[in-house]
Image (tube, rainbow, N blue to C red):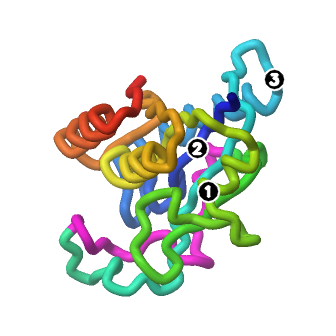
Amino acid sequence: MKRALIVVDVQNDFCEGGSLAVPGGAEVAFKIGTLLHHWSQRTPQAPPYDVAVATRDYHIEPGHHFSDDPDFVDSWPAHCVVGTDGEAFHPNLDPQPFDAIFLKGEHAAAYSGFEGRTADGASLADWLRNHDVTDVDIAGLATDYCVRQTALDALREGFTVRVLTDLCAGIGPETTKAALAEVRKAGAAVA
């Protein structure tokens, strides 16, 4: 049994000052960055992860996912466009310790990290299984969208799932509460 940390979409556009900022996003980036520092340095405070991976929104031309008049349910302002500073990891998050990075949403909306692929084409589910991972902890942005969908897909893929709420931030209090209730009901632990 191995445990992985999945860091979801901690990117500039999803943090304060970005085109689709999540309140508290920069603080989440800092907390995850601190946790990853302890993990990569194997300090006494290091969490017990065997691997750590990240997902990134990576939009080239996602069609109706972008809108000049977004409904903030199915359409959004342009964000995480490839080649812009907005698609980069937030500076509070040091991406160096990641064992793999999964890019999602090039030409269509993508909320789940399990829709992503590495640069060489490996899916998140296959990569985790190839590394004998059975348990995943999920952190990142936004709790009520991409974290939620990543957790639900991880459960569908047969992983034991825990959502780390102190390392997540959501867009709205009510939608965040509903998302956590949904993943808990589906079988995830919410810590």
Determine crowd level at label 1: few under 14, some 14-19, many 20+ residues with C-alpha closer than 10 A: many
Q: Position of residue 90 (x, y in %)?
A: 58, 52
Residue 177 lies, in percent from the top left, at 23, 36
What kind of element bears circle 2?
A: strand
Taking the magenta stretch, the answer to whether it contains residue 84 is yes
| Residue placed under numbered mark 1 in the picture | 124
Q: Is residue 53 shown in magenta?
A: no
Q: Residue furthest front?
A: 158
User: Which amino acid lies under the numbered mark 2 shown in the image of this protein?
Assistant: Ile
Which residue in the structure is indicated by mark 2?
6
Q: Quadrant of residue 30?
A: top right
Quadrant in which the N terminus is drawn: top right
- Per the rendered image, the range of residues in magenta is 72-93
Inspect this view and state whether residue 87 appears: no
Distance of label 3 from label 2 (alpha carbons): 18 Å
Please name the residue shown 76% across and 13% down the image: 44
Residue 40 in the image: state x and y as whole percent: 79, 33
Instruction: Give me the residue at 65% from left, 30% from top.
Output: 34
Residue at horizontal 69%, vertical 23%? 48
Residue type at the position of mark 1 = Leu
181 lies above or below 10: above
Circle on res. 42: 3
In the depicted structure, whether residue 114 falls above or below residue 51: below
C-beta proximity under 8 Å, tags 2 and 1: yes
Q: Main secondary structure of the magenta part?
A: loop
